[in-house]
């Protein structure tokens, strides 16, 4: 689009992650390892109408991709209604959702009927006992049922997100690729990131893209990169192909960050807008929204803010000596907006 709204590094405003709740029904060790959390106040959570309005203003400025996330988005009551409200906007050409799949079997058909186009299901392990140890949930079968329901409901290009952690699931890379092949889903291996919430992060638990490719090449033989042909070269995953044609992706946010092409920003469930997953502060859009400003005023606040954006959070983290967890638990408690489950993955 020639009239794209660019930031200070010439990156367009194109993709929005909308967190619909900060609540989650899993306690993944890499995201929510603590026993207790400070939640966003209930009255601060945006209504569907407020989310629809904000999305519409962003769409007017060039956003054409929206991904619903959280927390666990399916914990938000009546989510298909919000999907339908956003899908109604002709400027949103790609409407997707990331979910842990626990409640997906129940809602897949309604989400699709409402206009959700794409789904990513997080699946870190094929072994129920590992999920119990790592995410404090005995509901592995529900996730698998969710994946099957998504496929049977007709969601094409189903994706599976796997955060790879040394000593936990790094021996399951091939099993997950095989699972994806059987279920018509493409796996995306994600390097374990030092985002807010990952209070137990350390570099030695990160399995790099390079190491993943070496392990998979030993099992499958040569692996080819897949170059996007007229496709989305701003997508976070680099894609690869095995000799038999099976494709998979790797999101190398830690060892090979892709800030240069980042067109994404995030809105939390309480209407705080973050220009980078690592940003220290967000911009409060709820207050102007509830004060009754016009769409044009909201648009000019968003435009001016985006034009000044120069964040390169993941690249800056690369330069940190003795890199450890981004935040300690006390600073997460002081501001829950720093949490990954609030900011949206
Ligand atoms: N609850 C939904 C889910 O589980 O897919 C959506 C929110 S979750 C925060 C979004 C994605 O972020 C998931 O795929 C999750 O695995 C990923 N994620 C969370 N913490 C991460 C970390 N420390 N490093 C890499 N990915 C992480």
Image: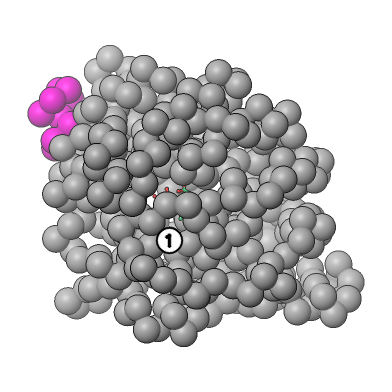
For residue 140, which quarter of the picture?
A: top left
Q: As rendered, which of 263 and 186 lies closer to the eye? A: 186
Residue beneath disc 1 = 259
Q: Can residue 35 be seen from the camera position used here? A: yes
Q: Is mark 1 on a helix, strand or loop?
A: helix
Where does residue 24 sit, x and y in percent of width and height?
A: 50, 56
Left or right of 136 on screen, residue 342:
right
Left or right of 266 on screen, residue 227:
left
**Mark 1 burial class by Cα count in 10 Å: few <14, some 14-19, many 20+:** many
Residue at 25% in and 57% down: 255
Q: Can residue 253 be seen from the camera position used here? A: no
Residue at 35% in and 20% down: 181
Where does residue 53 sit, x and y in percent of width and height?
A: 81, 59
Where 235 sits versus 145, above or below? Answer: below
Q: Does the magenta stretch include residue 216?
A: yes
Where 257 sits versus 105, above or below? Answer: below
Magenta segment main secondary structure: helix
Residue at 40% in and 83% down: 331
Left or right of 54 on screen, residue 5:
left
Where does residue 179 sit, x and y in percent of width and height?
A: 32, 24
Left or right of 174 on screen, residue 131:
right
Where 77 sits versus 249, above or below? Answer: below
Extreme-front residue of the structure: 138
For residue 31, which quarter of the picture?
A: bottom left
The residue stretch that appears in magenta: 213-222
Where 107 sits versus 336, above or below? Answer: above
Residue at 68% in and 49% down: 77
Q: Does the magenta stretch include residue 244?
A: no
């Amino acid at each position: 689009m020639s009239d794209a709204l660019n930031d200070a590094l010439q990156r367009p405003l194109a993709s929005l992650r909308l967190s619909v709740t900060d609540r989650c029904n899993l306690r993944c060790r890499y995201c929510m390892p603590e026993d207790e959390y400070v939640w966003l106040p209930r009255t601060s959570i945006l209504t569907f109408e407020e989310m629809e309005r904000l999305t519409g203003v962003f769409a007017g400025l060039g956003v054409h991709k929206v991904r619903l996330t959280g927390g666990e988005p399916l914990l938000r009551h009546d989510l298909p209604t919000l999907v339908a409200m956003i899908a109604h906007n002709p400027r949103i050409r790609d409407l997707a959702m990331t979910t842990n799949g626990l409640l997906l079997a129940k809602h897949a058909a309604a989400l699709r009927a409402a206009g959700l186009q794409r789904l990513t299901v997080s699946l870190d392990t094929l072994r129920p006992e590992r999920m119990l140890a790592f995410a404090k949930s005995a509901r592995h079968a529900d996730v698998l049922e969710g994946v099957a329901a998504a496929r049977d409901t007709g969601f094409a290009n189903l994706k599976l997100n796997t955060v790879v952690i040394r000593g936990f699931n790094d021996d399951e890379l091939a099993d997950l690729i095989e699972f994806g092949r059987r279920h018509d889903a493409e796996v995306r291996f994600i390097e374990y990131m030092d985002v807010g919430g990952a209070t137990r992060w350390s570099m030695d638990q990160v399995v790099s893209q390079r190491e993943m490719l070496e392990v998979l090449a030993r099992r499958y033989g040569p692996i080819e990169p897949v170059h996007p042909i007229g496709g989305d070269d701003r997508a976070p995953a680099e894609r690869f192909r095995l000799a038999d044609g099976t494709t998979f992706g790797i999101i190398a946010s830690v060892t090979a960050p892709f800030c240069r092409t980042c067109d994404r920003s995030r809105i939390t469930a309480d209407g705080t807008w973050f220009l980078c997953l690592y940003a220290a502060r967000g911009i409060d859009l709820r207050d102007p929204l509830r004060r009754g400003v016009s769409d044009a005023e909201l648009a000019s606040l968003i435009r001016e803010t985006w034009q000044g954006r120069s964040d390169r959070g993941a690249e800056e983290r690369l330069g940190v000596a003795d890199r450890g967890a981004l935040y300690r638990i006390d600073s997460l408690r002081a501001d829950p907006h720093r949490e990954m489950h609030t900011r949206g993955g």
